[in-house]
């Protein structure tokens, strides 16, 4: 099987979905001729034309708003927000319209759309090109929130998202776009939205992560194994709806849980996982549930040394693993 | 090691109980699960079984005294054994620490506490390898494994190892060992609370002793429904909610008067026909169980009086505010399984009564009346009777009378 990058997997998924279903559209800033700032849509404009792949103005509320209209009209828009940091102008559309349409119309109308957005720091992007925004949306019933960590899942999950009758927010770890490579079978396959995946089995503690942090978590787990600590790594993949069974089964086995995300700690997605574990697996716990997250500062800083201070990495995860294993 | 007898919490909202009677004297021997004392709570009387076999070393709470749930009532152990401090243990891990050398256990995590309880592990014997000598889950698991290796052959009753499933197998065990001795996962054990235990004992005994037969008929509820619709508001003015239960109880009373032999109990001397008509009504507490309060002298009550009594008993049952005598003395029982959608059932007799009437859901059905098709609110009635006391002929006569009463409002 060919090894490809994360960004190429996403490009392939878009290409194949555009070819499969002529209702599929790609809308976003610079997604047309330029092929996207990260080249996620490279070649698609040439292949499918300006009616299927088109540039929007620099106005995220209208990107999503146009997507809602198109979706209600029977099309399958894939909207790109160039950086997750820019999603806030579209927040009202996402919460008030996208998430609620199905509920509001008693299931008569759904919004089959995908909103793709690269997220995450460690790329020297500073305050406006580095943030993690998932926690704003995992609070919203009516949305699905997906974050792939590897090319195989990225392609399969994005295809599922396009085919889903309801809206899916699809956040892509941009630092991993060209860093993370993996085997992807040519041709069509899907990965279901919902299930998490145990990506490495272990019995000393359970580590829950997603996106770029899952990649780091696996690296840390390999190093921990060399020290005799067996870490079970769970790639959450879909944050909403969350896969309780897989999370609880893992904690029931190991008795210890570490949740890692790049997003800031307070009110972050890890709090939900910790709460699920504490309320449903309390008598299986052998240690307090731990979270290793970004520090509570307003944004990922720009200065390289400050960025390094903000970002998690395999070494910091390994330190936390050691400490929790010793508890 | 002496064991404490603790005042259990006999219901979700029950916070205290009164020691009514000690069934054993200090110094006498008791078996495990043998009734040790009778306790009265604001809901119901119950017997508390002994948590262990041994000698009742000391009674701490005398008869007549009311104490909070969790209070130590007595100690059970070997004759002459020293008992612990006479106050409630703070945690299961610290129970009876006096008889052995004291050791500071440190923090006991939830999973360690659970494993110790499920496998009866004395945590003072477990070596802690965690932070600051803390006993970890692994420590307990390897202790259990070690102990099982030391004493393998004795077969253990299933209830002694409630959580011996795959989930709890020590993770260090090689996979091959597990494959060579496959153990069926036993699942999760829900401990019996006194109410569940009482229900289980009563129902099993009833099925064992009385030959149960169930007969079913259906009743047209058109007239009762119309009567209820016409009188609901009137009753509401008196603060009474008029439910169909009142109609069913009333019909049972009518039928019991016509067939007094159904209002009876089987005894070895003969059939004891009761002079009072006391109707028990099963009140479900959801997954908490079921309690049957009794409408005393139901034949002396009008429909209004029945409805008022039913309202009051049902409400206080759910609040667990019944007096003990309000759950005793029933001569016949009504159970309304229709409230959960059931159409007909085979109820189990509430001993030592002769019969129990199950009422299904009232549903509109197509029926044929004088060769015409009509839509009527219908209900199935299931009468289970003690075949030692009456035969099908009598039982069917009784049930037909119930139907007749329901249809003639």
Image (cartoon, coloured by chain):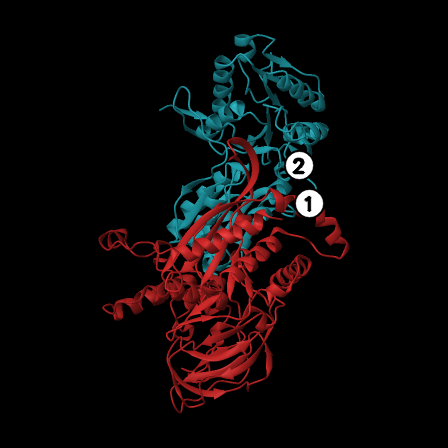
Residue nearer the viewer, A325 or A107: A107
Residue A199: image quadrant is top left
Does A222 sit above or below residue B256?
Answer: above
Q: Quadrant of the N terminus of chain A?
A: top left
The chain under label 1 reads B
Does A136 sit above or below residue B236?
Answer: above
Residue at screen point 56% across, 60% down: B253
Direction from residue B326 to residue A8 in the image, left or right: left
The percent position of residue B350, horizontal first and vertical second, equals 46, 64
Does B396 sit above or below residue A49?
Answer: below
User: Are the two marked residues, 1 and 2, in contact with CB atoms closer than 8 angstroms?
Assistant: no
Q: What element does badge 2 sit on?
A: loop
The chain under label 2 reads A
Direction from residue A189 to residue A307 in the image, left or right: right
Give the spatial CA distance, label 1 vs label 2. 75 Å
Which chain does the red colour mark?
Answer: B
Q: Residues within 10 Å of mark 2 (few under 14, many from 20)?
A: some
**Name of the residue lying farthest toward the right:** B237
Residue A311 shows up from this direction: no
Residue marked by disc 1: B229
Residue nearer the viewer, B279 or A212: B279
The percent position of residue A185, horizontal first and vertical second, equals 38, 23
Chain A rendering hue:
cyan
* Disc sitting over residue A302 in the figure: 2
């Amino acid at each position: 099987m060919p090894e490809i990058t994360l960004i190429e997997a996403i490009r392939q998924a878009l290409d194949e979905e555009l070819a499969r279903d002529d209702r599929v559209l790609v809308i976003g800033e610079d997604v047309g001729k330029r092929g996207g700032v990260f080249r996620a849509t490279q070649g698609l404009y040439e292949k499918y034309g300006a009616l299927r792949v088109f540039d929007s103005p620099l106005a995220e509320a209208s990107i999503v708003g146009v997507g809602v209209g198109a979706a209600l009209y029977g099309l399958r828009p894939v909207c790109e927000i160039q950086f997750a940091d820019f999603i806030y102008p579209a927040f009202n559309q996402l919460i008030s319209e996208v998430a609620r349409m199905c509920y509001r119309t008693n299931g008569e109308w759904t919004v089959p759309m995908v909103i793709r957005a690269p997220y995450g720091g460690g790329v020297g992007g500073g305050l406006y090109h580095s943030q993690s925004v998932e926690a704003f949306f995992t609070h919203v019933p009516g949305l699905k929130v997906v974050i792939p960590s590897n090319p195989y899942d990225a392609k399969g999950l994005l295809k599922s998202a396009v085919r889903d009758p309801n809206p899916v927010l699809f956040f892509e770890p941009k630092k991993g776009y060209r860093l993370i490579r993996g085997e992807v079978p040519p041709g069509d396959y899907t990965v279901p939205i919902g299930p998490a995946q145990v990506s490495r089995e272990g019995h000393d503690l359970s580590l829950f992560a997603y996106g770029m942090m899952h990649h780091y978590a696996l690296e840390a787990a390999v190093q921990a194994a060399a020290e005799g600590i067996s870490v079970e790594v769970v790639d959450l993949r879909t944050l909403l709806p969350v896969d309780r069974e897989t999370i609880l089964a893992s904690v029931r086995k190991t008795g210890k849980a570490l949740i890692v995300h790049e997003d800031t700690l307070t009110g972050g997605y890890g709090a939900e996982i910790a709460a699920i574990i504490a309320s449903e697996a309390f008598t299986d716990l052998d240690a307090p549930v731990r979270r290793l997250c970004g520090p509570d500062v307003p944004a990922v800083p720009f200065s390289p040394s400050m960025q390094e201070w903000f970002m998690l990495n395999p070494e910091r995860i390994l330190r936390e693993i050691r400490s929790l294993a010793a508890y | 090691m002496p064991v404490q007898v603790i005042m259990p919490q006999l219901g979700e909202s029950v916070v205290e109980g009164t020691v009514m009677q000690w069934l054993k004297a200090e110094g006498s021997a008791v078996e495990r699960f043998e009734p040790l004392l009778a306790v009265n709570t604001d809901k119901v009387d119950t017997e508390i079984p002994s948590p262990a076999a041994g000698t009742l070393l000391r009674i701490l709470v005398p008869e007549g005294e009311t104490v909070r749930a969790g209070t130590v009532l007595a100690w059970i152990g070997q004759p002459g054994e020293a008992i612990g401090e006479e106050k409630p243990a703070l945690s299961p891990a610290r129970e009876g620490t006096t008889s052995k050398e004291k050791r500071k256990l440190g923090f006991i995590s939830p999973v360690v506490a659970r494993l110790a309880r499920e496998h009866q592990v004395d945590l003072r014997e477990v070596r802690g390898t965690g932070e600051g000598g803390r006993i970890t889950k692994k420590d307990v698991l390897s202790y259990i494994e070690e102990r099982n290796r030391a004493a393998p052959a004795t077969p253990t009753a299933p209830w002694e190892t409630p959580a011996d499933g795959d989930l709890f197998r020590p993770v260090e065990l090689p996979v091959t060992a597990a494959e060579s001795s496959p153990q069926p996962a036993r699942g999760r054990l829900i401990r019996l609370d006194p109410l569940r235990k009482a229900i289980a004992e009563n129902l099993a005994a009833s099925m064992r002793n009385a030959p149960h037969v169930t007969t079913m008929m259906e009743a047209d509820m058109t007239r009762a429904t119309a009567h209820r619709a016409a009188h609901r508001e009137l009753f509401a003015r008196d603060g009474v909610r008029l439910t169909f239960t009142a109609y069913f109880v009333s019909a049972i009373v009518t039928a019991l008067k016509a067939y007094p032999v159904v209002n009876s109990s089987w005894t070895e001397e003969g059939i004891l026909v009761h002079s009072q008509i006391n109707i028990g009504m099963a009140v479900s507490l959801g997954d908490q169980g079921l309690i049957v309060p009794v409408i005393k002298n139901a034949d002396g009550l009008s429909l209004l009086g029945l409805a008022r009594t039913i309202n009051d008993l049902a409400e206080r049952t759910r609040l667990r505010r019944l007096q003990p005598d309000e759950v005793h003395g029933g001569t016949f029982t009504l159970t309304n399984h229709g409230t959960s959608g059931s159409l007909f059932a085979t109820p189990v007799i509430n001993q030592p009564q002769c019969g129990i009437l199950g009422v299904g859901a009232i549903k509109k059905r197509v029926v044929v009346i004088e060769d015409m098709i009509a839509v009527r609110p219908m209900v199935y009635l299931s009468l289970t009777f003690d075949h030692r006391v009456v035969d099908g002929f009598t039982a069917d006569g009784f049930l037909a009378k119930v139907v007749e009463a329901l249809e003639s409002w």
